[in-house]
Image (tube, rainbow, N blue to C red):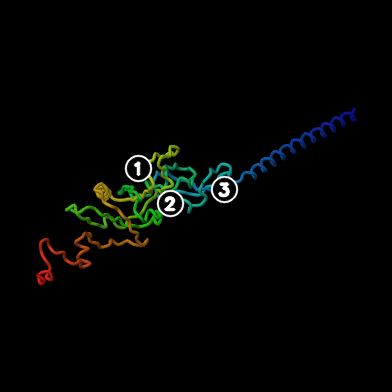
Amino acid sequence: MQRRRGLIWLSTGLLLAILAGLLTFRVLTQATEAASQAQEIVTRPVVVAVQDIPMRTVINEAQVSIKEIPEEMIPSGAATAITDVVGKITRQDIAAGEVILTQRLVEPTVKGRDVALTMPEDKVIIALPASDLMSKTGFLKPGDKVDLLFSLPDQTGEGLITVDAMQNLEIEAMVTPPLLAPKGDSKSSLKPTTALTNEGVLFFAVSAQDALTIKYLRDSGAIMDIVLRAPTSEQMLNTKAVDFSYVSNRYQFPEQPEAGTTTQGNTSGQ
């Protein structure tokens, strides 16, 4: 009887030991799997907004920070360093906590892109046909500093007067002829117009009053030419309007005899 009881206790102990071993093995397996899964989560640093940033704002360091997030959650184009975003202009509103994407930012010093975002708020953009020789040769590019020269009929209607009408303007953007709809091309998404056919377009940021002046000169039939300035030029050049009288005085044209008069040589010969 005692022997049977001993066997029962021994069997019970062995069974409990086996169950405890299985339980321990299961717990250790689950812990190992959890640790393995934790090790598989790879994070990367990205730039996030720490406050709401409105559109057309120049980002500063106080508005952003670095945050580690799982690699698979990082959107394409995410900025990964503070230097990628500070000093850039936002194309649209950015919410606090949002990952900042480089494609939603504009470099303020780069001409030719997103003119409406980088232009001063007290200026307007005016488009002028690139019909002058310097533009047609492809010599100009966005960011160049230029003067606009205009020649228009004088008050008599018999001569011209030429003025350096606008000085030290920067070309904000350009459209070159290959990007414009060629004449008669029905497949192009841009509708061809007589004003743009075979010509490029130059865009300038000017005051509203200067825009009106340029429009008046063009509507008056003035001929426009562009002269290029040094990239470091800031001064306003002292110029005078040029007409026939100015050219005559400068180059000392001989005076023309009045109608009905004779020269001294003809008088002595009579």
Which quarter of the picture shows residue 249? bottom left
Measured in 3D between alpha carbons, the distance from the residue under mark 1 to the one under mark 3, in whole angstroms, is: 54 Å
Give the secondary structure at mark 1: loop
Crowd around label 2: few <14 · some 14–19 · many ≥20 (10 Å): some
Tag 2: residue type? Answer: Glu
- Percent x, y for residue 118? 38, 49
CA neighbours of label 1 inside 10 A, class few (<14), some (14 to 19), many (20+): few
Task: Please name whichever residue, 143 or 85, is drawn nearer the observer in this view of the structure.
Answer: 143
Front tag of 2 and 1: 1
Quadrant including the N terminus: top right
Q: Provide the residue designation for mark 3.
A: 44
Say which quarter of the image contains residue 25.
top right
Give the mark nearest the N terminus, 2 or 3. 3
Which three-letter amino acid code belongs to the residue tagged 1?
Answer: Thr
Tell me the residue at 27%/54% (across/down): 150
Mark 1 and mark 3 lie on one chain; the one further toward the N terminus is 3
Mark carried by residue 107: 2
* Mark drawn on residue 219: none
> Can you name the residue that lies furthest to the front here?
270
* Spatial separation of the CA atoms under disc 2 and disc 3: 25 Å
| Location of residue 102 in the rendering, given as x and y in whole percent from the top left corner | 48, 47
8 above or below 69? above
Q: Amino acid at mark 3?
A: Arg
Q: Residue at x 45, y 43 (%)?
A: 96
Upstream in sequence: badge 2 or badge 1: 2
Question: Pointer 1: what residue?
Answer: 194
Residue 222, image x, y percentages = 26, 51
33 relative position to 119: left or right: right
What distance separates the C-alpha of mark 2 from that of mark 1?
A: 34 Å
How busy is the neighbourhood of tag 3: few (under 14 within 10 Å), some, or many (20 plus)?
Answer: some
